[in-house]
Image (spheres, rainbow, N blue to C red):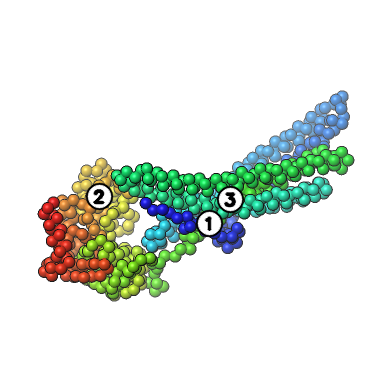
Amino acid sequence: MSQYREHKEVVATKAWDHRLFQRLLVYARPHWVLFVKSFLVLTLLFVFELAGPWIWRRAIDGPVTTAWQAGLEADRGPYVRSMLFWVGLYLAMIVGATIMRYFQVSTLNRTGQTVIHDLRTQLFRHIQHLDLAFFDKRPTGSLVTRVTTDIENLAELFASGVVTLGFDALRVVVLVILLFFIHAQLALTVLVLLPVLIGISIAFRGGARHAHRHVRAKLATLNGFLQEVLSGVRVVQIFRRESRVAGVFAHHLHEYYQANRKTIFLFALFFPAMSLGVFLIQGTALYVGVGSIVHKEMTVGLFFQFWLLLEMLIRPIRELGERYNVLQSAFASAERIFQVLDTQPLVREVSQAAPLDLPLTTPPHLCFEDVRFRYAEGNEVLKGISFEVPPGKTVALVGATGSGKSTIINLLLRFYDVTSGRITMEGRDLREIPLTDLRRRMGLVLQENFLFAGTVRENLILDRPGIRESDLQEALKTSSADRLLDRLPGGLEAEVAERGVTFSTGERQLLAIARTLAARPPIVILDEATASVDSETESKIEHATHRLLEGRSALVVAHRLSTIRRADQILVLEKGEIIERGTHQELLAMKGAYYQLHELQFAVAVEG
């Protein structure tokens, strides 16, 4: 079971990456109207919030102070009516602020989700178009984390990070001006102490980004391992590896837990430190403010307004760490997302690529010309492979495991590109043919076939245009899959579980063959198509394949030589080279590698 390495996930960058932020803004610009609406909502909410301290000041310095100065003997009627007016106005302010807070939450979240909808769509499409070499090196769980968790972090950035952080800066400026307007000396005292809070926030941000990158890396590792285990749960159970797997999972979970502990520690230290700074400012403001009231420099109501505005000033500064946390978490996720988006597929179309000038129903001429290939890391897999597949002919590939049979199939499908040499179709290099045009001409049946959750019909058609009901029925009949459907409740509309686990290996093979043949492709590729079925099913598939492949170009990979006796040419591979070629009878007459393999399989069959 693979061990995912942390250094593949962690990406170290600067604390503030202007280039990264500019890239994120690219996805926000098309939705600038939503950001303007969000800013307007925050502005209206701020206006309602500013009205609150002003109402308190007018109420305290008005009816409250007047009633207190008049004493208990005075008529309270005028004061009560005045007080009721201010109370009613304050309640109206609360209602207005509540409505604005509703629009704040809904508008900001709508903005964030709209922006990441575009980004998530682009990321998913980009991943789909990456070649197999990319997926060979990355666990599935890591990519799932990028499309889900990392994208959601960016939603938080656009919902409560960028807009709110920008508006908080404006809020602080306005509030500082108002405080100076109310009482310059007291405002100056507060302003002198504000750097204490700002300093705490700056000190906190130093470790925040690193901590979040570490958490994301550990989460991706955990998800990747979990994805692998769930996909191979049958292997885990049959080999009684539950304890070992649980131990490895516990190790990854512990590392994820430790990474989160570091983040928790930072916050546990940050918030009390911020509270201490807030208490220091409030205590100083209270001391200076009471002195000003005693010396008649300001009224009680004016001080109360100052105190409430001070609370409003401290709030965004106190939340600066949380905002910065959102920003850093989003940057850590953005690094990982753009790491994928910046990955370009190795398999590309040349600028002059043009569709093949050949009807889709006409089998083409295929040619391998001195093809050599090596994977990114490793020895040469194919060493000067040359052969042809004439139109309507069948060429079979045989050889030991690792001889290069499946690699030839992958190169023909352009899952990888040749290291040297070339593969041509109708004389044109495959790299000069658009991938869509190339692959729509091919039908592929793999050794391990994947069925998607849905109905049998959906799995057979796969949204491919041009597949008629008659084509589907013929494919089912030819592959003998129609008998399987007769036993299924619902037939073609029967539900298929994820990965087709409710079907046997042989049944999945029959459905995969029917799926390939339904489109009637001019090229058919069978990669060990009968390797996992019983003898009776193999006989049916062999007979059906013989009828179906007539008039089509075909490349067949098989271990069972009985399935390729009728091939027009058989290529025997060994360590990436063709060591023998010819028909079944010609190769037997050579009494070489093919003959020995045939005799070995015949002896095993007789013993069985």
Residue type at mark 3: give it. Answer: Val
Q: Which labelled disc corresponds to residue 505?
A: 2
The amino acid type of the residue labelled 1 equals Ala
Cα gap from disc 3 to disc 1, whole angstroms:
12 Å
In the rendered image, residue 257, in percent from the top left (x then y), is placed at 50, 45
- Residue 326 disc label: 3
Disc 2 from disc 1: Cα separation: 41 Å
Picture coordinates of residue 56 (x, y %)?
76, 38
Between discs 2 and 3, the one toward the N terminus? 3
Q: Residues within 10 Å of mark 3 (few under 14, many from 20)?
A: many
Q: Is residue 268 left or right of residue 555?
A: right
In this orientation, does residue 294 appear? yes
- Please, what is the three-letter code of the amino acid marked with disc 2? Thr
Compared to 354, does 232 lie above or below?
above
Residue visible at 18% across and 68% down? 569
Q: What residue would you read off at disc 1?
A: 334
